[in-house]
Image (spheres, rainbow, N blue to C red):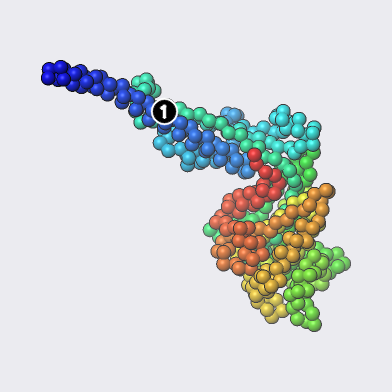
């Protein structure tokens, strides 16, 4: 009996001696698992951040610190903060942008006929509190996790961008998304877009991106509207025996129209595809809105300008602050738009199909129509939803939203990320 009691006592003592060791192993395993999890999360965050930064395509010019531009820092911090849980702070964050000439693989690839690319490198270190602090020195109550990710932006194809811009009277109103009239904020956005396109055009051995613009109210205004070199408003719809002919309008969508109609107080005109962005912005800076709204007029003329493009990617971006309103030849513009955009006539499908039949160089043309609605519920515009497809219709709340969405659309067309 005594031997049993003695053995039990020894076992109890042994258990007491093992408990600290077992707890130490438990806490070590717990902190180790936490570190591995934090490492994985940081890597995911940096991968997402590098792709987002590459898509945004900022110059990455900083204040001399070498840590990257404020824009890229903000993007990266946003992703890291979102992914990391229990993080004390971001201890270090650095973004580096390398041009093709700074990347040996890119230089070698160019000689072999491969696509040019540039590279963003994003590195970060984050501080974390452990679950158990006993494994750390008194002076080090946190541990650090580091990671790095690289994203490459390939410049495969230049793009011909056609802005189909609403110049109806409401574009001359104030709005909550900016501090100017709507058309003035839109001009600033387009100017910023051309700055980004110029960056690609400055790259040696790359085709040039182009921009064009069609302004519309109830009509479009063309530089050769009368066929004799004079600028005037033109009706892009077709008629038979004085009646609107929907089918003829669709079949002749790419036929340039001539013949002046009554003028309005608006002042704008179409601008053909160009690489001279400075002149382009100077010209459209003189435009003024006015009149009612018929988006189909702009879409038809936009298709004609897209057909003049020289690049394998064609992107038509419809920019509007509201539904069609007013009437043409006694028919409501909204009714005309819904009929032409809808399943019966499918004019936008016709536009894409015809553009996609073209060959640019030795490449098949790929076209896309996108809609950016601002200062109204673009989901309520059934016509434009049918035209572009719901997945290509976007709502912008403010000036920056418009800019970011346009840049995103263009980035998708110009190249791909890796």
From this viewpoint, which residue is outermost toward the front?
A: 1
- Residue 127 can be seen, yes or no: no
Mark 1, secondary structure of its residue: helix
For label 1, the residue is: 32
- Left or right: where does residue 217 sit relative to residue 26? right
Picture quadrant where residue 392 is located: bottom right
* Image position, residue 303 (x, y; %): 75, 62
Classify 33 as above or below 374. Answer: above
From this viewpoint, which residue is outermost toward the right?
A: 228
Q: Which of the pair 61/21 is nearer the observer? A: 21
Picture quadrant where residue 316 is located: bottom right
- Left or right: where does residue 165 sit relative to residue 133? right
> For the point 56% across and 61% down, which residue is it?
375
> For the point 54% across and 36% down, which residue is it?
46
> For the point 75% across and 61% down, which residue is it?
353
Quarter of the rendering occupied by the C terminus? top right
Q: How crowded is mark 1: few (under 14 residues within 10 Å), some or many (20 or more)?
A: some
Classify 382 as above or below 57. Answer: below
């Amino acid at each position: 009996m005594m031997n049993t009691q003695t053995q039990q006592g020894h076992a109890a003592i042994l258990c007491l001696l093992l408990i600290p060791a077992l707890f130490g192993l438990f806490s070590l395993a717990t902190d180790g698992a936490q570190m591995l999890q934090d490492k994985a999360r940081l890597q995911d965050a940096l991968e997402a951040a590098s792709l987002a930064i590459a898509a945004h395509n900022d110059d990455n010019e900083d204040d001399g610190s070498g840590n990257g531009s404020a824009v890229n820092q903000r993007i990266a911090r946003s992703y890291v903060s979102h992914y990391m849980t229990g993080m004390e702070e971001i201890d270090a964050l650095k973004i580096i942008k390398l041009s093709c000439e700074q990347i040996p693989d890119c230089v070698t690839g160019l000689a072999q006929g491969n696509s040019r690319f540039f590279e963003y490198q994003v590195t970060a270190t984050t501080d974390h509190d452990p679950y158990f602090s006993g494994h750390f020195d008194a002076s080090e109550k946190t541990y650090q996790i580091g990671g790095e990710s690289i994203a490459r932006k390939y410049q495969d194809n230049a793009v011909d961008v056609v802005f189909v811009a609403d110049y109806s009277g409401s574009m001359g109103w104030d709005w909550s998304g900016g501090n100017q009239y709507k058309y003035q904020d839109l001009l600033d956005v387009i100017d910023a877009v051309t700055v980004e396109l110029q960056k690609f055009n400055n790259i040696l051995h790359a085709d040039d991106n182009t921009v064009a613009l069609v302004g519309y109210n109830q009509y479009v205004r063309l530089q050769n509207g009368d066929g004799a070199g004079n600028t005037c408003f033109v009706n892009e719809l077709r008629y038979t025996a004085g009646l609107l002919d929907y089918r003829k309008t669709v079949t002749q969508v790419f036929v340039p129209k001539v013949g002046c109609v009554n003028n309005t107080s608006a002042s704008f005109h179409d601008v053909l595809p160009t690489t001279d962005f400075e002149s382009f912005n100077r010209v459209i800076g003189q435009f003024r809105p006015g009149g009612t709204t018929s988006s189909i007029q702009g879409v038809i003329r936009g298709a004609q300008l897209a057909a003049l493009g020289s690049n394998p990617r064609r992107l038509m971006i419809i920019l509007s602050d509201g539904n069609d309103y007013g009437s043409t030849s006694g028919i409501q513009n909204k009714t005309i738009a819904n009929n032409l955009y809808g399943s019966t006539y499918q004019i936008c499908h016709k536009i894409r199909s015809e553009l996609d039949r073209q060959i640019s160089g030795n490449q098949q043309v790929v076209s896309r129509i996108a809609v950016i609605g601002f200062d109204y519920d673009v989901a309520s515009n059934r016509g434009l939803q049918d035209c572009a497809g719901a997945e290509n219709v976007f709502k912008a709340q403010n000036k920056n939203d418009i800019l970011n969405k346009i840049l995103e659309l263009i980035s998708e067309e110009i190249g791909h990320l890796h």
